[in-house]
Image (spheres, grey):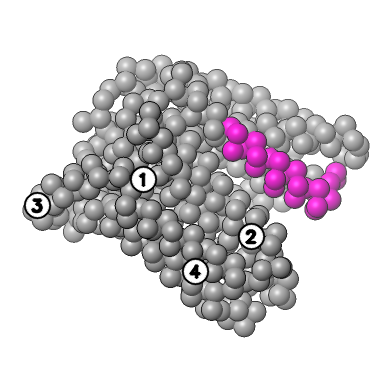
């Protein structure tokens, strides 16, 4: 039990610091730059800084095959500390491109850290119970780091200032780097890395220089084709609803301040609760049975939310129903995220050890790509067809994913006897 707790603390802490750059760029930076008088166009260009996360699958084979995970983690977290120290010396009002450069560096380092910590998680977590709890630590830790940077630091930045805020982050990252340097949970993994070092210099090392061989191996892993399609599409309907429903409320029922509280704080709390519950349920029930029921519940919740689009007159009842709808949607979304990352990790554990991190990074990249692409298109769909028609489209996508999952639990990649196979 103590060993499992050590694993959860280790993974949760690393995913927490990994979520900090996202929180800085998604919540803190736009508000700070707008307050400093920067144009919306310039602020919009900051989204380019997320690009390293899409490309991380390209350098994942090198992280998998060269060095140990401990060295990669200490190196990247130490690099994040140095990037924060550099940003502390800059004033965003006068050095916007310098700040952008340090944040781009933080994303590059965090994406490499993600590959390494995912590889550690795949190696450390064994069995359904550990996978569920480990992926809960991943999702909750990342979200908590994002809320800390995007919400907590934003609340004190007017008092503490930009430089002191980044000095705080420098000490946080430096402390985590020291923690990883002496973390006992990495001892076994480090030994495996050292023992495999000779093999890496041989045929496996050659594979790192020939990516097409790695791709062939990854796609040949059992369950990969189904999982690829699933991670690209499982959030499409939900992402459209989560992105657009708050804007509908802003047009008809809520002020920006009310929406920020209910959707940004309360709903995120429900999302974290859902993610946490996912780990508990996975220790008790099969993932196939859970996914069947949760995806059906998500579709039902979207039907309820769609019905609210017909109410245009503001009222206390409508506001309460809207808050309930958003809370349920975020709760189920958090639960589904934990189930999804557990499914991804289980699939990656079927791969040979030398490509497990790369395989998981490949799936995680597609998961991000699917969500970001549809988020960018959802607004255009609403502008063209209106909220009601767009929501019908979102609902159809959600129902299609539920059917995809339901079928797979009986005849496809989520069949119970497949999920009970031990990784090779």
Q: Nearer the viewer, residue 306 or 181?
A: 181
Image disc number at residue 84: 4
In terms of secondary structure, where does tag 1 sit?
Answer: helix
- Please report contact status of discs 2 and 3: CB closer than 8 Å, yes or no: no
State the image quarter where residue 348 is shown. top left
Q: Main secondary structure of the magenta part?
A: helix
Q: CB atoms at circles 4 and 2 under 8 Å apart?
A: no
Check if residue 24 falls in the magenta segment: no
Is tag 2's residue or tag 1's residue first in the polypeptide sequence? Answer: 1
Question: On the image, numbered disc 1 is attached to which residue?
Answer: 118
Front position among marks 4 and 1: 4
Q: Earlier in the sequence, mark 4 or mark 1?
A: 4
| Callout 3 secondary element | helix
First along the sequence among labels 1 and 3:
1
Magenta range is 250-274
Q: Sequence-wise, which precedes: disc 4 or disc 2? A: 4
Q: Residue 210: x and y, percent? A: 18, 56
Q: Observer-nearest residue: 162 or 183?
A: 183
Using the numbered discs, state the Cα–Cα distance from disc 1 to disc 3 in whole angstroms: 23 Å
Q: Is residue 201 above or below residue 157?
A: above
Which marked residue is nearer to the observer: mark 4 or mark 3? 4
Work out how far the residue at label 4 is from the one at label 1, CA to CA, in angstroms.
23 Å
């Amino acid at each position: 039990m103590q060993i499992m707790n050590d694993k959860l603390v280790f993974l949760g802490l690393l995913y927490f610091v990994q979520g900090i750059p996202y929180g800085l760029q998604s919540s803190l930076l736009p508000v700070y730059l707008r307050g400093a008088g920067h144009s919306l166009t310039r602020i919009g260009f900051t989204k380019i800084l997320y690009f390293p996360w899409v490309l991380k699958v390209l350098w994942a084979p090198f992280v998998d095959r060269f060095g140990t995970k401990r060295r990669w983690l200490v190196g990247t977290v130490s690099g994040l500390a140095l990037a924060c120290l550099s940003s502390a010396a800059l004033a965003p009002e006068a050095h916007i491109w310098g700040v952008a450069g340090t944040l781009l560096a933080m994303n590059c380092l965090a994406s490499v850290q993600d590959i390494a910590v995912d590889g550690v998680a795949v190696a450390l977590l064994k069995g359904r119970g550990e996978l569920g709890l480990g992926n809960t630590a991943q999702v909750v830790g990342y979200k908590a780091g994002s809320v800390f940077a995007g919400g907590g630091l934003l609340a004190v930045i007017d008092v503490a200032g930009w430089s002191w805020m980044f000095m705080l982050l420098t000490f946080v990252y430096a402390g985590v780097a020291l923690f990883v340097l002496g973390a006992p949970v990495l001892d076994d993994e480090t030994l495996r890395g050292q023992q495999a070092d000779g093999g890496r210099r041989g045929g496996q090392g050659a594979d790192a220089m020939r990516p097409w061989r790695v791709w062939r191996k990854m796609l040949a892993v059992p369950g990969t084709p189904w999982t690829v399609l699933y991670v690209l599409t499982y959030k499409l309907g939900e992402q459209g609803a989560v992105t657009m429903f708050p804007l509908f409320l802003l047009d008809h029922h809520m002020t920006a301040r009310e929406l920020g509280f209910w959707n940004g704080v309360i709903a995120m709390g429900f999302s974290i609760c859902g993610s946490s519950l996912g780990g508990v349920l996975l220790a008790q029930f099969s993932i196939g049975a859970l996914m069947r029921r949760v995806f059906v519940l998500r579709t039902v919740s979207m039907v309820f939310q769609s019905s609210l689009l017909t109410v245009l007159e503001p009222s206390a009842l409508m506001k309460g129903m809207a808050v309930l709808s958003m809370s349920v949607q975020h709760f189920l979304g958090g639960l589904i995220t934990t189930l999804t990352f557990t499914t991804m990790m289980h699939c990656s554990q079927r791969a040979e050890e030398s490509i497990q991190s790369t395989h998981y990074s490949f799936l995680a990249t597609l998961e991000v790509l699917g969500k970001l692409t549809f988020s960018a298109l959802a607004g255009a769909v609403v502008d063209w067809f209106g909220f009601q028609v767009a929501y019908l489209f979102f609902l159809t996508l959600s129902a299609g994913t539920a059917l995809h999952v339901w079928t797979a639990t009986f005849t496809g990649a989520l069949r119970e006897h497949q999920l009970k196979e031990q990784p090779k």
